[in-house]
């Protein structure tokens, strides 16, 4: 099965930057969209950014102009460059990958989550 391995989380000052990486590993799989979600204490999980295999991108309004998602399809890896970080960006960030199954069905895979903490 697909395993998602994340890296790059940590503690950073407001205005600083972090780069998250997520690599999918396994055998005999393909992936459509990959993306990043986050969940802050007391809040629901929300989409941060998503990119399809064809390069279509969707960002949450709160991160537009500050975050950049990118993807290397050959490596099954997705990145999230986070600049101008704000305390409200503090959350657990989860990598997501959608594996096609049949028709419009797909399996939704998740990473273990990585903590991003932005100090004021």
Image: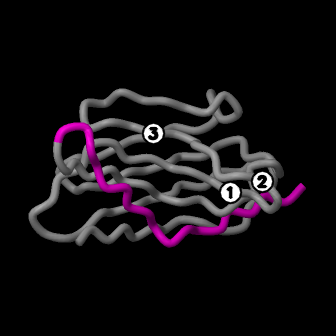
Residue at which label 3 appears = 50
Residue at which label 1 appears = 39
Tell me: 45 left or right of 90: left
Position in image of residue 63 (x %, y %): 66, 35
Tell me: 62 left or right of 32: right
Say which element carries label 2. Answer: loop
Q: Where, by quadrant of the figure, is residue 119 drawn? A: bottom right
Q: Residue at x 71, y 59 (%)?
A: 91
Question: Which contiguous range is marked in magenta?
Answer: 103-120
Q: Point out the image quarter for the N terminus.
A: bottom left
User: Which of the two marks, 2 or 3, is nearer to us in this view?
Assistant: 2
Q: Where, by quadrant of the figure, is residue 11 drawn? A: bottom right
Tell me: 87 left or right of 39: right
Q: Is residue 46 magenta?
A: no
Mark 2 → mark 1, Cα distance in angstroms: 6 Å
Q: Earlier in the sequence, mark 2 or mark 3?
A: 2
Quick one: 93 or 82, which is closer to the camera?
A: 93
Say whether marks 2 and 1 touch (CB < 8 Å). Answer: yes
Residue at which label 2 appears = 43
Q: Residue at x 73, y 46 (%)?
A: 85
Q: Residues within 10 Å of mark 2 (few under 14, many from 20)?
A: few
Q: Earlier in the sequence, mark 1 or mark 3?
A: 1
């Amino acid at each position: 099965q697909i395993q998602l391995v994340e890296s790059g989380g940590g503690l950073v000052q407001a205005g600083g930057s972090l780069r998250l990486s997520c690599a999918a590993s396994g055998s005999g799989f393909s992936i459509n969209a990959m993306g990043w979600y986050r969940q802050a204490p007391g809040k629901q999980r929300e989409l941060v950014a998503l990119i399809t295999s064809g390069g279509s991108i969707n960002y949450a309004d709160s991160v537009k102009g500050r975050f950049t998602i990118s993807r290397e399809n050959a490596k099954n890896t997705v990145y999230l460059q986070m600049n101008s970080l704000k305390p409200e960006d503090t959350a657990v960030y989860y990598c997501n990958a959608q594996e096609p199954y049949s028709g419009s069905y797909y399996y939704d895979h998740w990473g273990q989550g990585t903590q991003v903490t932005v100090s004021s």
